[in-house]
Image (cartoon, rainbow, N blue to C red):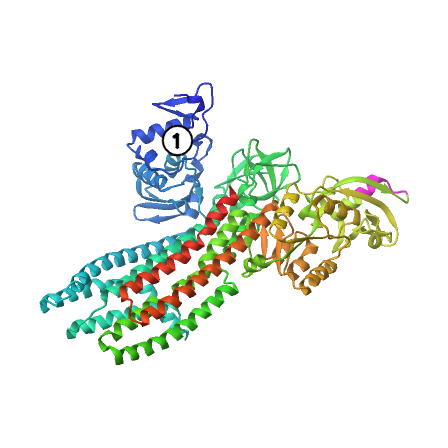
Amino acid sequence: MDATAASCHHCGEPVAGGQPVTAGDHAFCCEGCAAAATWIQDADLGSYYRLRSANANRVQADRLDLESWDRSELLDEHSRAVDGGREIVLLTDGMRCAACAWLIDRALAREAGVLDTTANAVTGRIRIAWDPARTKLSALLHRLAMLGYRPYLATGDAREQARMSERRRWLLRLGVAGLGSLQAMMLAEALYLDVNATMPLPTRDLFRWLTFLVSTPVVFYSGWPFLAGMARELRARHVGMDTLIASSTLLAYFASLVETIRGGTHVWYDAAVMFVFLLLAARMLEQRARNVATAQVDALARAQPVFAIRERDDGERESVPPSALRVADVVCVSAGDGVPADGVLLDAAADFEEALLTGESRPVRRHAGETVYAGTTCRERPARLRVTATGAATRLSQLAELVDRAQGHRPPMAQLADRVGRHFVVSLLVLAVCVYAGWRMYQPDRAFEVTLALLVISCPCALSLSVPAVLAAAHGALARCGVLATRPEALDTLARATDVVFDKTGTLSDGRPSRVAVEVFDGLDADAATRLVAALEKDSGHPIATAFADVDARALARAVVARPGQGVEGDVDGRHWRFGRGEWAARRTDDGGLWLGDGRHGVARFTLNERPREDAAVAIRALRAQGLDIHLASGDSEGAVQRLAHFLGIVSPHARQSPEDKLARVRQLQSEGRIVAMVGDGLNDAPVLAGADVSIAMGEGAPLAQQAADLVVTGPSLLRIADAVRVARLSRRLVKQNLAWSAGYNLLAVPLAAAGLVTPWIAALGMAVSSLVVTLNALRLARTSTEMAA
C-alpha cells in the first residue's frame, strides 16, 4: 500500500508523506485518528466503518480543554437533574450520518457512570444522562473528542426538550397507527376475500369485533392531533383540513361500529386506520423537512464557547461564563477557540474563521481596531479583545433571532392557500351531501362507502402543505446561502423583481475608503484638519469613518448629527464644524472631494478612494444573466460613481443622490411597472430600503438598514444576492407546481370518487401520496442550496 498517496482511514484527509501513521493495514493522517480507529476496533465497533456514508472529523482532542465542563456554574445552567444523576444536551458538527449516531451511542454506553445516551444524526444533538458520583462529564466528552466529535453547548435546551418530547409522542402515535393498520388490513382482507358469502356469520362478526378493538387506539390515540385540531377549528368557527380529516375518520369508525352491532353488510375500519396512519406519516415527513431546513439555528448555537478568559485590571486572567462578560471587559481568545462576545481587536493582527456568520470559507485577517464577532474562531495566534456587545446584543444572537423570526412567517401566498382550503372544505361537505343523496336513490347499499371515499380522497392536505413545505425548505436554503429573510412576502417579491438598485459605498465598494490626499486652507495644517474630521466621524457609523479610524482625534466631538446625503456636523473645541459635500459643508462646488468647513467657508479638502468588492463584477454579471436590470444610485461624487460604474459595466449610474433622490428613483421605476429590489447598507439607505418593493441589506451595514430590509446578507459576498434570487424564483415555481398538482389531483380524484370507482382505503392511499408529492417537491430546494454551496 502506498501510504503517501492514501487518504486517512478515519477522517478521509490526505495522508502526509514521509513517515505516515499506520495501524494494521490502514494509514492515518495523525496519531489521533489512528488512536480513534484502534479504540473502535478494540471495542468491537468496527462495523462503523462499514455502515458509515461519510467520513468522520479529524481527531484533535489534544487541543480541547474539556475540564471546564465540570464546573458547577456550567452544569447548573446547562444540565438538569434526573433520576440517578444529571442530563445534558450537546451539539456536535461531526455527526454526518446514522452510523455516527450509532457509534456515539455505543461508545458512550461503554463508559462507566453513563445512565442513558441518545445521538440524533439529523439535528446533530447528543443527550447524555450520567451519574456525577461515578464519572465526570469531561471524561465522557474526552471520549467523544477522541472519536472526532467535538462537543458544543446547545442553547435553548428547554425548547429542544419540548421538541424532542413532541417528536417521541408523534413517533409513538405513528407506531401504534402502523401496527393497527397492518392488523386491520389483514382482518379486512379476510372479509374482502369472502366474495361468495360462505364465511359463517359468527366468524365474520368475530373478525369485525377484532378489527374494532385494533382500530380504536389508532383512531383516538394516533388520530388525537386531528381530533384536537378539529376542536380548535370548530371553536374558531371555521372548518379546515383537520375538521375534514377527523370527521371522515370518525364517520368511518362509528358507521363501522353501528354496522358491526347490527350485523350490516359493510364495515370501513380499514379506511379509518389507513387514513390516520398515512396522514401521520405525511405530517412527520413535513416536520422532518422543517427541522432540516432550520438547522441554521443549531449551527449558531454551536458557536457559543463554554467559558471566556477575562483579563482583570491587574493583568491576571480568570475563566468566566460568557454571560458574566460586560462591555469594556478585555477577553483573551486562544488559538482554536471561539470568540465569546463582539469586540474590538487589541494588539497584533489575527486571523478569524467567520464561515458560520458570513460564509467566508477562508480565515479573515483582522487588524487592531477592527470588530471581531462572537461565534467566530480565532485561528493560529491568540488575540485580545475589548468587549463591545454581549448576550442578545451580539451579531450572533441577532442572526439567530432573524432565523427564528423568518421561520414563523405566514406570507400572503400561504394565507391564500389556507383560505382556499377552507372554502374547498365547505364546498366538499356540500358536495358530499349531494353525492350521498344521489347514491341513496341509485344504489343505497353503496351510498355511505362512496361518500366516505369522496371525503377521504379529496382531503386538501396537499393544498395546505403546498406553500408551507416550500417556505420551510426555502428559508433553510437561504440560510445555507448566507441570506436571512425578515419579512413574510420577501421571497415572493424577490422572485418577481425586474430591477436591482445598488448603493455604492459599503455595498458595491469594499466600504473601506482610504485617504489619498488632503489640501488645507486658511492656515490650518493637514494633521489638525485630519484630527478634526476623525473626531466628527468617530461615532457616525458611516463607512467613511473607517478612513480616519487610525487617527488619534484627541478632542471629543459633541452634538454630532449625521445628515443623510450631506455629511456629518458637530462641535469640536467649542467650534461648529461640518464634513461632507462641498456645497453643504463649505459652499463649494461639487468637485468630487469631501470638505471640512463651518457651513460658509472651507478649511480642508479630502480626497478618498475605495475599491470595488472583489466579487462585485461577477455578481453584477450573474444578476444580469438572470434577466435583471442593474442601477447604481450613490451619494458619492460624480467622478467616483462614474469610475465604479464603468468598471462594473453599469450603464445608468446616478451620483450625488440624497436619500430622497434615491427614493424618487425607485418610485420612478415602480411607476413604469417595474418591481424594484434595493441593495444598501448605510443609515441613509433605510428610507429607500423601506420604499422598494423588496430590499436587501448587507450584514456588515448599519442596524437601522437591516431593520428596514426584507432580507439580510450575513456576509460580504454579493454573489449571495444572485443565489437568493435563484432560490426565490425556484421556490415560487415550486409553489405553483404544488398548487397545480393539488388542483389537478382534486379535479381528477373528486369525479372518480363521486362515480364510485374508488374504495375508501385506496382513497386514503391516494390522498397520502398527493401530500408526499408536494413535500418531496419542496425538498428540491435543499438540493439546490447544497449545489450552490458547493
Q: Position of residue 464 (x, y in %)?
A: 42, 64
| Neighbour tally class for label 1: few under 14, some 14-19, many 20 plus, Cα within 10 Å | many
Is residue 269 toward the left or the right of residue 80 in the image? Answer: left
Residue 227: tell me if it is visible: no
Where is residue 716 drawn, in percent x and y?
A: 61, 45
SS at badge 1: loop
| Residue 218 showing in the rendered view | yes
- Residue tagged by mark 1? 10
When asked about the image quadrant of residue 209, the answer is bottom left
User: Residue 524 colored magenta?
Assistant: yes
Residue at (38%, 26%) from the top-left corner? 34
- The number of numbered discs placed on residues in the rendered structure image is 1
Task: State the image coordinates of residue 335 (x, y, percent, origin top left).
Answer: 54, 33
Residue 563 location, quadrant: bottom right
Q: Which picture quadrant has residue 365?
A: top right
- Which quarter of the rendering shows the N terminus? top left
The amino acid type of the residue labelled 1 equals His
Magenta span:
523-530
Residue nearest the viewer, comparing 509 with 728: 728
Label the magenta part by its dominant secondary structure. Answer: helix
Nearest the viewer among 686 and 528 is 686
Q: Position of residue 451 (x, y in %)?
A: 30, 73
**Residue occupying the far top of the picture:** 18
Residue 44 position (above or below residue 683): above
Is 170 inside the magenta-drawn segment?
no
Q: Residue furthest right?
A: 522
* Residue 400 horizontal side relative to residue 225, left or right: right
Q: Residue at x 34, y 39 (%)?
A: 99
Q: Residue at x 26, y 75 (%)?
A: 447
